Amino acid sequence: VQLQASGGGLVQTGGSLRLSCAASGSIFSINVMGWYRQAPGKQRELVANDMGGGTTNYADSVKGRFTISRDNAKKMVYLDMNNLKPEDTAVYYCNAIGRFMNPGPMQSQWGQGTLVTVSS
């Protein structure tokens, strides 16, 4: 399975961006799709994930500003980011957890990352 993320870029404080991530390849089922980010010198952290069935989770720092959504038919996950702040600057990675082969174990797959830069 491959994950292709897109949509990053340079935006001013208060601006908006939409990240997209498409899953392709051998996929039997995907349970969780999410977004993580890693700022320079910091550890990768969860931004938001969609566990299916209407269950979503958000980092406290993005609650009320970011929205994750998922299109299971298209095997895509999106992250709408509003009211962006300089501290949101990071490389954003999409992640999928699922069963990519049947039979097969649950596995985690990462996309290549897309850079979001928020200028002050």
Image (cartoon, rainbow, N blue to C red):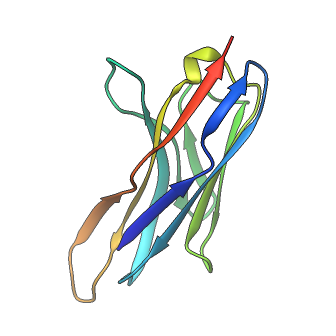
The residue that appears at 59% across and 60% down in the rendered structure is 77
Could you tell me residue 115's position as x and y percent? 51, 37
Position of residue 95 relative to residue 23, above or below, is: above
The residue that appears at 40% across and 56% down in the rendered structure is 111
* Side of 76 where 18 appears, left or right: right
Residue extending farthest to the top is: 120
**In which image quadrant can residue 60 be found?**
top right
Position of residue 54 relative to residue 17, above or below, is: below
Position of residue 6 relative to residue 26, above or below, is: above
Task: Return the residue nearer the eye: 52 or 98.
Answer: 98
Location of the C terminus by quadrant is top right
Could you tell me residue 5's position as x and y percent? 51, 55
Q: How many labels does the image show?
A: 0
Residue extending farthest to the bottom is: 102
Task: Return the residue nearer the eye: 9 or 44.
Answer: 9
Could you tell me residue 74's position as x and y percent? 61, 77
Location of the N terminus by quadrant is bottom left
The residue that appears at 31% across and 26% down in the rendered structure is 43
The residue that appears at 55% across and 73% down in the rendered structure is 75
